[in-house]
């Protein structure tokens, strides 16, 4: 249901996005540099149920020197987040795509401007691991956005190609053991822990927090 998001790929600049003025929104991609921010859209009249929002994007903790040193010595912080409703996840680190780029031996090939980030996103399909899930318990408004509440000099957040999936309504279903569990009405699957969904049989297994792969249909 990505069509519910206005201008999800920033092809119309900043149109549809509320909040802090973008450092740049050039028709291909949007960024925030060296400031706190909150950019969002309020999606009106959404049905109750399970939603997953995703996008391409990354965060760099300061300028190149600061960020690479912090990444190497383990002091790096991921200060920018993707959020949906009351749930949020940190953006990917710029250095998560180390199979494609390097900062070793005097070479720095990671993106360092909107043109290079646009190539990484829209030509190479990189930095696609940003995803957040939210269960809207009652029909109403749903807020999708990205934010950073703590200032850090010369840091950089950049994003593109937002997507929104709806996996159907959620209900509470009593099971023979006397407990209630969240059930996805559309798929028939039960929430068994975190973002993991399984069959009714899995609710009674000793290792209830099993790691299930979530398919595109939400099962």
Image (cartoon, rainbow, N blue to C red):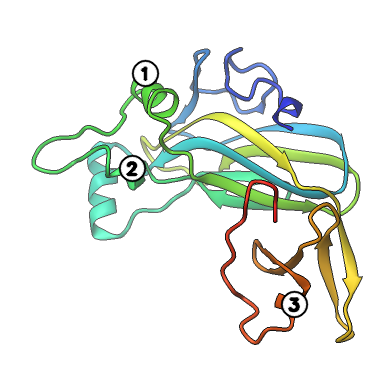
SS under mark 1:
helix
Q: CA distance from mark 3 to mark 1?
A: 50 Å
Mark 2, other Cα within 10 Å: few <14 / some 14–19 / many ≥20: some
In the figure, 201 relative to 159: above or below? below
Q: Is residue 86 left or right of residue 184?
A: left
Disc nearest the viewer among 2 and 1: 2
Q: Position of residue 56 (x, y in %)?
A: 50, 35
Residue 149 in view: no
Query: Callout 3: 10 Å neighbours few (<14), some, many (20+)?
Result: few
Quarter of image, res 219: bottom right
| Disc nearer the start of the sequence (3/1) | 1
Q: Is residue 12 above or below residue 193?
A: above
Residue corresponding to mark 3: 201
**CA–CA distance between discs 2 and 1?**
17 Å
In front of the other: 165 or 32: 165
Q: Residue at image x 83%, y 52%?
A: 186
Image disc number at residue 97:
2
Tell me if I can see residue 11 in this picture. Answer: yes
Give the quarter of the image for residue 200. bottom right
Decide which of tag 3 and tag 2 comes sooner along the chain.
Answer: 2
Horizontally, residue 10 falls left or right of residue 58, namely right
Cα separation, mark 3 vs mark 2, equals 38 Å
Q: Residue at x 35, y 47 (%)?
A: 96
């Amino acid at each position: 249901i990505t069509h519910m998001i206005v201008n999800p790929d920033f092809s119309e600049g900043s149109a549809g996005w509320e909040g802090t003025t973008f450092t740049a929104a050039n028709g291909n991609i949007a960024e925030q540099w060296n400031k706190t921010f909150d950019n969002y859209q309020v999606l009106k009249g959404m049905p109750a149920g399970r939603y997953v929002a995703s996008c391409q994007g990354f965060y760099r903790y300061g300028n190149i020197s600061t960020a690479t040193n912090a990444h190497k010595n383990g002091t790096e912080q991921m200060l920018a987040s993707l959020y949906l409703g009351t749930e949020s996840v940190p953006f990917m680190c710029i250095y998560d795509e180390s199979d494609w780029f390097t900062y070793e031996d005097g070479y720095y090939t990671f993106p360092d401007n909107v043109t290079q980030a646009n190539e990484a996103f829209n030509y190479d399909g990189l930095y696609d691991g940003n995803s957040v899930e939210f269960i809207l318990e009652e029909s109403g408004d749903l807020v999708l956005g990205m934010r950073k509440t703590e200032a850090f000099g010369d840091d950089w957040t950049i994003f593109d190609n937002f997507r929104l999936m709806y996996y159907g309504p959620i209900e509470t279903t009593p099971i023979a053991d006397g407990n209630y569990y969240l059930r996805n009405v559309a798929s028939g699957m039960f929430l068994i822990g975190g973002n993991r969904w399984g069959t009714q049989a899995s609710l009674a297994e000793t290792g209830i927090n099993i790691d299930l792969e979530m398919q595109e249909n939400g099962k």
